[in-house]
């Protein structure tokens, strides 16, 4: 057997699965033949008797426990064998439990890390750094995400699933996927949480029909949408601690974000709060494992967080490292997710907008204005495609929307065209028949744009499109 010399009592015990008793070591020809020199050392030490007992656990032999008797002149007997087998059986269960726990913990950590983002998506609105620390015992369901949105905006998300282990990690993955999917609908922060809340309630109904008594209700989430054009950030929470805002001079604020109820309870609506975030500030999102580590309460944790964030002039990466060093000197007892985002503003020279009269003749003026602005940005090659896209979107707004109508161009990593009006009726892409005289406008937009869509606002809707450009990445301020 591996690790034991052939012919030795431990090797024989591993093969047979039974205790091996060598009552008189000095008289054992097997031990003498195997290693005479070592045998002389054993006898010189005073060893008189050997008992090898296999560690049985769940039908598997994990190893051997060897008992050597040197001081007592009496050899091991059958009573000693019974006692040793009882002792080793209990030790084997403990060893197997530790192995199983370690294996499950490592599996849960691997699953958790595979379901979390491995990097930050490309975007220019925020300079983002993040950290995830699993608990030293029992992986939980803490998670985070960075999601680019239309209009150069970016969503920041942190969440915490109740419970620990594989189920919590798998549930975290389901919630993160749900938030990503709902974000494609470009919903306001509070409406997105309402959708996730309904999903969690349905998930609990499904889980309640299964053999295991597991729940998702009680999961928390904080969802923030940052707009680099206005510098505003819309934040809504579901039972989760609010963000910290570090101003450029190092002042730390904890904005009054309504905590809300955890996900799955579905009793009260969520409330979003609009924050103005000065350029160069730091938005800090975290889970409660950061501020409630050890025996300290949340108030003490928040003050410690304020102190660790208050030194200005640091990058988000440096802030992450400093915060964890100050607040978690030892491995945490609960999962910790930390997300630090430095805010930037889109260069005003990269923004253009026009009011559009609700008349078909206004389309030509829009085309001329767009051509001039694209020439200023060095994007003459994009003029034809952009004019075509905006012509279709503006025409739709004039025909089916409601005044006032407005056009906005944003030159970020992509060229973004937006047409807004005060109607809540959104156009739908359809495939016109060969005999139809119209109905091909949005089809052309979908063909020429990288992507396009609709988002609703308090005053109506915005139809947008994005195009890749060949002019390289524009500079951003901040």
Image: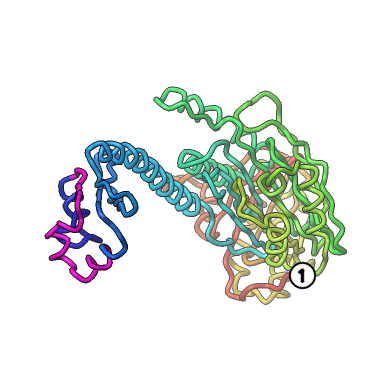
Q: Nearer the viewer, residue 56 or 199?
A: 56
Is residue 118 located in the magenta-colored stretch of the structure?
Answer: no
Horizontal placement of 394 versus 438: left or right?
right
Using the rendered view, name the quadrant where residue 416 is placed.
bottom right
Secondary structure beneath dot 1 equals loop
Dominant secondary structure (helix, strand or loop) of the stretch shown in magenta = helix
Magenta extent: 17-42
Using the rendered view, name the quadrant where residue 292 is placed.
top right
Residue 331 visible in the snapshot = yes
Q: Residue shown at 80%/64% (left/top)?
A: 280
Q: Position of residue 307 (x, y in %)?
A: 82, 57
Horizontal placement of 80 versus 9: left or right?
right
The residue carrying mark 1 is 477
Q: Residue shown at 54%/32% (left/top)?
A: 216
Residue 362 visible in the snapshot = no
Q: Residue shown at 82%/46% (left/top)?
A: 255
Is residue 32 located in the magenta-colored stretch of the structure?
Answer: yes
Q: Position of residue 362 (x, y in %)?
A: 73, 55
Horizontal placement of 344 versus 75: left or right?
right
Q: Position of residue 196 (x, y in %)?
A: 59, 36
């Amino acid at each position: 057997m591996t690790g034991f010399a052939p012919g030795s009592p431990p090797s024989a015990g591993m093969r047979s699965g039974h205790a091996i008793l060598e009552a008189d070591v000095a008289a054992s020809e097997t031990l003498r033949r195997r290693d005479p020199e070592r045998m002389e050392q054993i006898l010189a030490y005073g060893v008189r008797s050997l008992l090898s007992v296999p560690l049985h656990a769940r039908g598997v032999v994990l190893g051997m426990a060897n008992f050597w008797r040197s001081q007592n002149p009496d050899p091991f007997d059958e009573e000693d064998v019974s006692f040793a087998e009882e002792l080793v059986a209990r030790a084997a269960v403990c060893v197997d439990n530790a192995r199983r726990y370690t294996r499950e913990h490592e599996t849960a950590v691997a699953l958790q890390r595979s379901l979390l983002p491995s990097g930050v998506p490309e975007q220019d609105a925020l300079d983002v750094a993040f950290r995830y620390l699993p608990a030293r015992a029992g992986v939980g369901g803490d998670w985070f995400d960075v999601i680019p949105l239309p209009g150069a905006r970016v969503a920041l998300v942190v969440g915490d699933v109740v419970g620990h282990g594989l189920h919590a990690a798998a549930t975290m993955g389901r919630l993160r996927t749900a938030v990503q999917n709902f974000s494609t609908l470009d919903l306001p922060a509070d409406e997105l949480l309402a959708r996730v809340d309904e999903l969690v309630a349905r998930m609990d109904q499904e889980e309640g029909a299964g053999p295991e008594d597991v729940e998702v209700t009680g999961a928390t989430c904080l969802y923030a949408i940052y707009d680099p054009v206005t510098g505003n950030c819309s934040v809504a929470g579901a039972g989760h601690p609010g963000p910290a805002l570090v101003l450029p001079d190092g002042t730390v604020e904890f904005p009054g974000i309504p905590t809300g109820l955890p996900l799955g309870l579905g009793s009260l609506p969520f409330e979003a709060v609009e924050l103005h975030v000065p350029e160069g500030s730091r938005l800090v999102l975290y889970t409660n494992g950061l501020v409630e580590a050890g025996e300290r309460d949340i108030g003490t944790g928040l003050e410690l967080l304020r102190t660790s964030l208050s030194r200005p002039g640091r990058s988000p990466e440096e802030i992450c490292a400093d915060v964890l060093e100050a607040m978690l000197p030892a491995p945490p007892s609960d999962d910790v997710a930390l997300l630090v985002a430095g805010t930037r503003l889109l260069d005003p020279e990269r923004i253009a907008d026009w009011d559009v009269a609700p008349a078909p003749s206004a389309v030509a003026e829009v085309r001329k204005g767009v051509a001039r602005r694209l020439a200023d940005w060095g994007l003459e090659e994009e003029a034809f495609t952009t004019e075509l896209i905006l012509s279709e979107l503006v025409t739709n707004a004039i025909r089916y929307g409601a005044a006032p109508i407005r056009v906005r161009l944003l030159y970020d990593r992509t060229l973004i065209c937006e047409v807004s009006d005060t109607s809540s009726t959104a156009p739908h892409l359809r495939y016109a028949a060969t005999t139809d005289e119209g109905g091909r406008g949005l089809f052309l937009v979908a063909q020429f744009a990288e992507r396009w869509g609709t988002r609703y606002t308090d005053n109506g809707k915005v139809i947008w499109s994005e195009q890749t450009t060949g002019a390289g990445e524009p500079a951003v301020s901040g």
